[in-house]
Amino acid sequence: GAVVSQHPSWVICKSGTSVKIECRSLDFQATTMFWYRQFPKQSLMLMATSNEGSKATYEQGVEKDKFLINHASLTLSTLTVTSAHPEDSSFYICSANRDLYNEQFFGPGTRLTVL
Amino acid sequence: SQQGEEDPQALSIQEGENATMNCSYKTSINNLQWYRQNSGRGLVHLILIRSNEREKHSGRLRVTLDTSKKSSSLLITASRAADTASYFCAPASGSARQLTFGSGTQLTVLP
């Protein structure tokens, strides 16, 4: 149990386009999901907290107009990278909080490459 | 949220040996989670240990928690090459659900 999926697993796009990444909790409901970004050889950096039915909370330095987050249901959160640029190329990982015991489970990540 | 500090930064052992990595944190916690990350992959949840627990086992994994020293350890017994990965600890306090990650311990198990 406690599986989190992400789609797509990788995406290559041209500069200026928008990319949507989906995060789903497959066998549990998640009121809260999180989005992280990881650059090569670095640790995960929290970008934002996604709460079902309300606006996301962004970490300092993360542009909310560039990284649009929607958490429309208890099993789905989406991250849209708008007008992507090469510096947005990174590994994006989501996680979902299973309320019982407050465990957090991570998706397999999405590799975004912006040309 | 608070960040756990893993130690050592890197560990290289032979297959079959045990691997121990440590985590220290600064303020009291409700629980602490350990994760594994293979290169280019997401994090795999290994174990959650609550503040009122001192030790927890899962297969070849053994996690201890010493709240008086604000530290935790992860022991992997009879290591395998497939255990090669980065390992992260994530302490959680209060009602906060955000996790903050340190640099992790890069474990290399040599065949």
Image: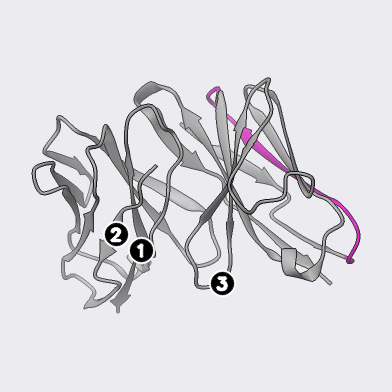
Question: Which kind of residue does numbered mark 1 sit on?
Answer: Gly
Disc 2 target residue:
B5
Category of crowding for the residue at label 1, using alpha-carbon neighbours closer than 10 angstroms: few (below 14), some (14–19), many (at least 20): many
| Sequence-first disc among 1 and 2 | 2
Residue that numbered label 1 is attached to: B104
The residue that mark 3 highlights is: A40
Q: Are marks 1 and 2 on the same chain?
A: yes
Residue A75 in the image: x percent, y percent? 63, 26
Q: Is residue B97 left or right of residue B60?
A: right
- In this rendering, position of residue A95 left or right of residue B66: right
Work out whether residue A1 or residue B39 is closer to the camera in this orientation and state it: B39
Tell me which residue sits at (89%, 66%) in the image.
A14
- The residues colored magenta run A14-29
The amino acid type of the residue labelled 3 equals Pro
Name the mark nearer the viewer: 3 or 2: 2
Residue A98 lies, with reference to residue A109, above or below; the image says above
Q: Determine the secondary structure under disc 1.
A: loop
Do labels 3 and 1 touch, CB within 8 Å?
no
- Residue B77's mark? none
* Chain at tag 1: B
